Amino acid sequence: MKKIIYSLLLISSIAFSQTEKNVGDFTKVSSFDKIDVQLIPSNENKVILQGKEADQVELVNKNGELKIRMPFGKLLKGDDISATVYYKKLDAVEANEGSRIASKEEIKAINFDIICKEGSEIKLLNLQASRLQVRTSAGSIVTVKGSVKNQDILSNSGGKYDGQDCVTEQTVVTVNAGGIAHVNATDLVDAKTRAGGEIRIYGKPKQINEKKIAGGTIEQVK
């Protein structure tokens, strides 16, 4: 019986492992290969990896950008990997190759940049920033809640930006080729569509400038 229990525990430990790594200073997090990333503010920079192949995840810190990815032979095979990233300062995130980046905690920044592509997802539920820039494409989804003074949004090729709960003063938003953007502003919105796409404007801004090239819809939500 003891041998059976020991064998089961051994199998369990092989199937699910946890690895903690110190990664040095960084201000940007980029994810790849379907890996799920959770962001936690902290007084230290480190990453805790969980999953049956957690020990194979590559963490590359180059010029302040922390890349979280699988090795060459296991591309796009990180869907059972969870990475919890503890950071001291953060001003940019990028999700690639079907990966996911999320944060429930407050993120404070002067300038914050978001890139989301290749069917990935980014969800930040409490962002406080002076300026926000978002680039989303290829079926990716970016959700942002919080408060931002100025934002610049570009949604291409079926990408979606859900920012109706991100209150801004001024917003510049462009959608191309079926992109979708929902924005919120109190003062000014510059909205442009090219080759289709949808823009929905919340917050009853004082001024809206619209431009449509080859179709698309721009709607103010009352």
Image (tube, rainbow, N blue to C red):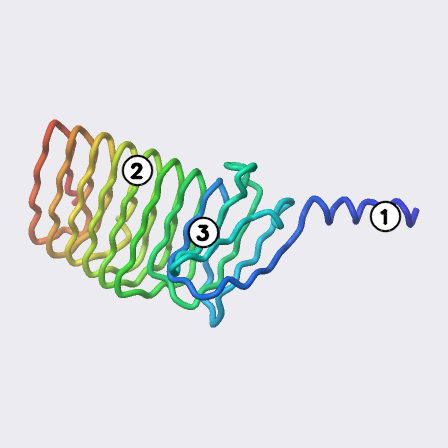
The kind of residue on which mark 1 rests is: Ile
The kind of residue on which mark 3 rests is: Lys
Q: Is residue 49 above or below residue 210?
A: below
Q: Can you tell which quarter of the image residue 110 is in?
A: bottom left
Q: Nearer the viewer, residue 45 or 103?
A: 45
Observer-side mark, 1 or 3, equals: 3
Distance from the alpha carbon under mark 2 to that under mark 1: 49 Å
Which of pointers 1 and 3 lies earlier in the amino acid sequence?
1
Observer-side mark, 2 or 1, equals: 2
In the orientation shown, which residue stands out farthest toward the right? 1
Say which residue label 1 marks: 5
Question: Considering the numbered disc 1 on the image, is that residue within a helix, a strand or a loop?
Answer: helix
Give the image location of residue 99, x and y in percent. 45, 42
Q: Is residue 187 above or below residue 42?
A: above
Give the image location of residue 31, x and y in percent. 44, 47
Give the image location of residue 185, x and y in percent. 17, 53
Which of pointers 2 and 1 lies earlier in the amino acid sequence?
1
Which label number is shown at residue 137?
2
Q: Are marks 2 and 1 in contact (CB under 8 Å)?
A: no
| Quarter of the rendering occupied by the C terminus | top left
Residue positioned 56% across, 58% down in the render: 48
Question: Considering the numbered disc 3 on the image, is that residue within a helix, a strand or a loop?
Answer: strand
Distance from the alpha carbon under mark 3 to that under mark 2: 20 Å
The kind of residue on which mark 2 rests is: Ser
Q: Are marks 3 and 2 in contact (CB under 8 Å)?
A: no
Say which residue label 3 marks: 67
Question: Considering the numbered disc 2 on the image, is that residue within a helix, a strand or a loop?
Answer: strand
